[in-house]
Image (tube, rainbow, N blue to C red):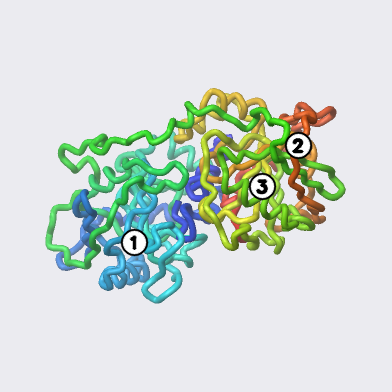
């Protein structure tokens, strides 16, 4: 289970979660199976993040309105294209007046998008560029790196500055046991200075803050929109200039800042914390409420209720598409046992589809709805602002109290009610807050659980098409409500997947589960 916890951290911080230049979160390159993260040759590489610049070396000076000045050392020897791009954009005044559009406490602050949405920006050459990675540079607190939308070949203008957290030795050993190759030098940094070790090797790190790290740590505490992590009040980059290092004092670590107060910028509660919000997935349906009936060829009918009170745009979009007959004849193109089934793409590849308004829309999230088994939500490519037509229905698995405590240790918040649901009905708790949930299956959950067992091939695509014959909008007529798989006579949450296979599946699918692009 610990490997699964580590795997989903990647998915949610990056999916759920962060640096995607096409959305609010990155589509992280898979980094949870041991083969994909085997960097054994990196163990002897000296880490360069905190090496001193030489006099007259090129540095970056960033002035942030109402906060102060941040200075950053650059590493052209390890990230030549990344440095060239950032310097070029800064000299053009590209970043002047932009904002940090995404801020996550104990993780990072992200900016550099002229649209301010997480979907814009381009390199100095136009479009994207390949920045690569170098093992000399890690995601220590204060590291500067490029956001990307699935690989360092999609670098543009968006960047982030790491804050992260200080890891314990047990944390590092847990990462290592999950396949991450963290050198002893990196371990020392992550257990003293802090950072985000699970991002190493997936993003182009090209700089390190040497003055003003306390400013970055203060910015990370601003109040943000719970739906997209956007600051409630703009954090404005007044200017980014290219300067020369003039033997200024080097203050690499947050502990170097005298009088630094982690609580200097109070975090205002704009909404109730998730642990105090009542879960509404299984709340009563009233006669006459709009519901969805989905007929799936060779499997049967699935019915789910809608939540316009918590996902108004998401419900409006799905109803609009259904009434157009948009989903009729499409397939479930991605199926992962003990996780979910995904459909709604007219191309059947995971790359297509659009909302009823054309393009994408922002469906947001609401803490009243969680990823319980049977939840219906929109797939996205890094942000709820990229919702379209693709959707998924959760199957998940049942979690023990110990499992959920492990998630809590990694920063997830669950109410007692949510923990009860995940430990009885099951689901996918690590996805909460990252996707627009807009429905809940109340009849036909056994059909969904049967579909998840279908044989799949490349990209988790069923070997034989699972076809959605029709999706109809109707009204609830007072018929029997069966929220839980245990409500279905003869149904079982067990699957024929062997334990060893199931563990591998959990690890190998940690990358951007619900992308609207191929994995």
Using the image, tell me which numbered label, if any, was put on residue 392.
3
Front-most of residues 343 and 55:
343
Using the image, tell me which numbered label, if any, was put on residue 24.
none
Q: Which residue is mark 1?
A: 206
Q: Secondary structure at mark 1?
A: strand
Using the image, tell me which numbered label, if any, was put on residue 445.
2
Tell me where residue 485 sits by quadrant.
top right
Relative vertical location of residue 66 with respect to residue 203 in this rendering, above or below = above
Report how far apart the C-alphas of labels 3 and 1 lie in the structure.
37 Å
In terms of sequence position, does the residue under pointer 3 or pointer 2 come before the other? 3
State the image coordinates of residue 75 (x, y, percent, origin top left). Answer: 30, 64
Relative vertical location of residue 88 with respect to residue 108 in this rendering, above or below = below
Tell me where residue 94 sits by quadrant.
bottom left
Q: Secondary structure at mark 2?
A: helix
Q: Secondary structure at mark 3?
A: strand
State the image coordinates of residue 52 (x, y, percent, origin top left). Answer: 21, 57
**Badge 2, how many Cα within 10 Å: few under 14, some, many 20+?**
many
Report how far apart the C-alphas of labels 3 and 2 lie in the structure.
13 Å
State the image coordinates of residue 77 (x, y, percent, origin top left). Answer: 31, 67
Image quadrant occupied by the N terminus:
top right
Residue 142 visible in image? yes
């Amino acid at each position: 289970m610990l490997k699964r916890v580590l795997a989903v951290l990647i998915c949610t911080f990056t999916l759920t979660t962060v640096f995607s230049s096409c959305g609010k979160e990155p589509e992280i390159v898979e980094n949870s199976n041991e083969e994909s993260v085997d960097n054994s040759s990196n163990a002897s590489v000296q880490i360069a993040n905190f090496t001193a610049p030489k006099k007259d070396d090129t540095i970056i000076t960033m002035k942030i309105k109402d906060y102060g000045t941040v200075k950053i050392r650059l590493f052209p020897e390890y990230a030549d294209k990344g440095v060239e791009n950032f310097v070029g954009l800064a000299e053009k005044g590209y970043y002047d007046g932009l904002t940090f559009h995404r801020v996550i406490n104990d993780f990072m602050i992200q900016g550099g998008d002229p649209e301010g949405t997480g979907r814009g920006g381009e390199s100095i050459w136009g479009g994207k560029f390949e920045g690569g990675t170098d093992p000399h540079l890690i995601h220590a607190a204060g590291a500067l790196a490029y956001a990307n939308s699935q690989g360092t070949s999609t670098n543009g203008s968006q960047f982030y500055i790491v804050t992260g957290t200080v890891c314990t030795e047990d944390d590092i050993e847990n990462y290592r046991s999950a396949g991450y190759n963290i050198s002893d030098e990196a371990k020392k940094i992550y257990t003293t200075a802090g950072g985000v070790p699970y991002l190493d090797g997936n993003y182009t790190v090209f700089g390190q803050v040497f003055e003003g790290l306390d400013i970055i740590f203060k910015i990370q505490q601003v109040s943000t929109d719970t739906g997209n992590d956007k600051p409630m009040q703009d954090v404005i980059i007044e200017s980014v200039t290219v300067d020369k290092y003039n033997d200024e004092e080097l203050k690499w670590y947050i502990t170097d800042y005298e009088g630094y107060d982690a609580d200097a910028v109070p975090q205002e509660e704009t909404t109730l914390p998730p642990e105090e919000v009542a879960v509404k997935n299984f709340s009563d349906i009233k006669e006459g409420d709009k519901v969805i009936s989905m007929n799936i060829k060779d499997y049967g009918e699935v019915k789910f209720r809608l939540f316009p009170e918590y996902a108004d745009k998401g419900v409006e979009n799905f109803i609009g598409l259904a009434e157009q007959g948009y989903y009729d004849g499409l397939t479930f193109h991605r199926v992962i046992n003990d996780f979910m089934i995904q459909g709604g793409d007219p191309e059947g590849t995971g790359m297509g589809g659009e909302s009823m308004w054309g393009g994408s829309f922002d469906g947001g999230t609401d803490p009243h709805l969680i990823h319980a088994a049977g939840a219906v939500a929109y797939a996205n490519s890094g942000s709820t602002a990229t919702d379209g037509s693709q959707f998924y229905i959760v199957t998940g698995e049942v979690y023990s109290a110990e499992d959920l405590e492990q998630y809590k240790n990694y920063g997830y918040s669950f109410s007692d009610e949510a923990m009860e649901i995940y430990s009885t009905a099951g689901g996918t708790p690590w996805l909460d807050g990252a996707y627009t949930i807009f429905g809940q299956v109340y009849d036909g959950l056994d059909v969904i659980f049967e579909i998840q067992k279908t044989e799949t091939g490349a990209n988790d695509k069923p070997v034989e098409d699972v076809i959605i014959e029709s999706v109809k909008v109707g009204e609830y007529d007072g018929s029997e409500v069966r929220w839980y798989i245990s409500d279905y006579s003869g149904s079982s949450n067990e699957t024929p997947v062997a334990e060893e296979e199931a563990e591998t599946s959990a690890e190998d699918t940690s990358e951007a589960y619900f992308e609207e692009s191929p994995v």
